[in-house]
Amino acid sequence: MGRYFKQIAKSVRANGAAASGSEENADDFLGCINIPLNEIPVVGYDKWFKLEPRSSASKVQGECHLILRLFTTQVPLDTKMLALTGYHNWFKTSIHKWLQIVHERSTDRIRKAVEMDQLEQIQSQTKHSSSAVDVTTCFSQVREFWAQLAWPDSAGAFIFITRLTDVSASKLHFHKHAVCVALNSTEHVRVYLGGLPRELDWRGVEQAMEESCGLEGKEQVNKSLNGQLYNADIDLQREAKRLITHLTDRMLPELRRCIQHISLSPDSINTDEAVAPLMKYLDDTLVILNESLLKENLTRVLQSLWEVLLRMILDTVGENRGVQVEFYTRFQYTVETLVRFFHADGEGLLLEDLKSGDYKALDEELRLNKCSSFELIEQYFLEKISQQRILKHSRFGRISLKCYYDAPEQRLTVEILHAADLIALDANGLSDPFVIVELCPHHLFPTARSQRTQVKLKTLHPVFDELFYFPEQYRHRCACLTFTVMDYDWLSTNDFAGEAVAPLSDFCWPGRPSATPAGKTLQPVILHLSRQKPSGMLIYREAQEFVRKLKEIEKSMEEE
């Protein structure tokens, strides 16, 4: 009642002219309600709102019942468009805020999910962690909300699609309570992300951007969105590779023990018996991996395990040079057995994947170490012939010659015509070249001696025009003529300028034009010189050293 009479008194005073504008006539503040427009739901409000104070000194109480609805009215077109534009801009701002909230809450949810990780069945015998399910569920909920929103402007939605992709493609880390589980979880999320282009209708955004901005707009969408997805896929594959490496590293001690058993087994032990511990360990391991991993991950782990074994065997062979041939035969059998195991009659790794990379180097190493000394020398000359065939130009110059076999005379005729563009090996910028011609390998031609041209002084383009005869022919794929160009030095050792090889199969075998007297009319053969670097494989370097020592022995025997 006191407040009621006070209000009557104020009303009476308000009717007086003298005090009508004074502060005393102001109405009392009873409370207010502040409702942000961007918080009003589409369906509106029908509720009681509690009155709020205007300042800390205000004391208010009570509630107010409001019914609020969002609606449009008929207004002039310009005014309506202005209002819609403003509302659209406000809504875009709200979407940006929503995306930020989605990112923060999704990250927090994933973190909590990892902390409370549980195993979930993905197939009858394969498990992944519950955090992987929570990750894809977060993204699915965001995707469903975006679909319900049905943004009308596909071109304008590009920025939001980019943010949604960025949220989905964030880096993820799974609980490492089990390597196989973590590996499956990573693959589970990676496969889900692969479906984003379809789920978020990237194609529709591309078409809309092409219509509004041309081909450049479409390329921008394609580059931006696919770039995000590509980077996310690379990150997840990198994480998977790290997990696979961790998994195979745990197998290393037992694998080393098995390889050492093969290496140290005496010759009295059967090869199958020496390899048996390794194959039993791999069989037992495969059973566990097959029960624990997705098929894609099983293939990756097997590929990594195969590469580990190849490097391990290659290192073991390299550390045991000069041993008996049986050692290399045993490891070659081991490699063949492993190929069959990992291939599994077509159910495992592909043969082209198995027989690549380190396999080729290991197979070559084992094959060569099983060869005799003479076989190694033949391999050395086969490599020289192969390199000569692909040599099309050289900074060491070239040599011109003719070779033909005279059947009636049963002799091989070699015409050394001239050389050109030789390298300068003397202080005067020139050389004193001569050519040594010989049949190789020497063990195939024990009675054939090397022959040489005359020395041509102070020239890089010598003309020789000399004939040489070799009474022998040998039908062997590594048999060849070697032409060694030297720089004569009467005060010290002659300098090596370059060399070339010509296989006898090009001149002496039946059916060749040069295997008849008509070969004299053939065009000269141009051979490019090389200063061949030692092969990367130690076994070839040993063969080259063997050839060098063999030549020195022959030379000393000739002098005696």
Image: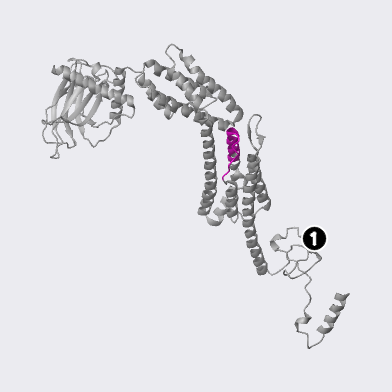
Q: Is residue 201 left or right of residue 246?
A: right
Q: 531 above or below 339?
A: below
* Quadrant, the N terminus: bottom right
The quarter of the picture where the C terminus appears is top left
Magenta residue check for 330? no
From this view, report whether residue 556 is shown above or below residue 38. above
Q: Residue furthest front?
A: 57
The image quarter in which residue 23 lies:
bottom right
Expressed as whole percent of the image width and height from the top left, the position of residue 32 reads 76, 68
Residue farthest toward the top in the current orientation of the protein: 268
Classify 393 as above or below 416. Answer: below
Query: What percent of the width, then of the height, locates residue 128?
Result: 63, 35
Magenta region, residue range: 171-190
Question: Can residue 355 be spotted in the picture?
Answer: no
Quarter location, residue 456:
top left
Q: Nearer the viewer, residue 248 or 97?
A: 248
In percent of the image, x 47 and y 16: which residue is there? 274
Q: As drawn, is 96 to the left or to the right of 459?
A: right
Q: Is residue 11 left or right of residue 287?
A: right
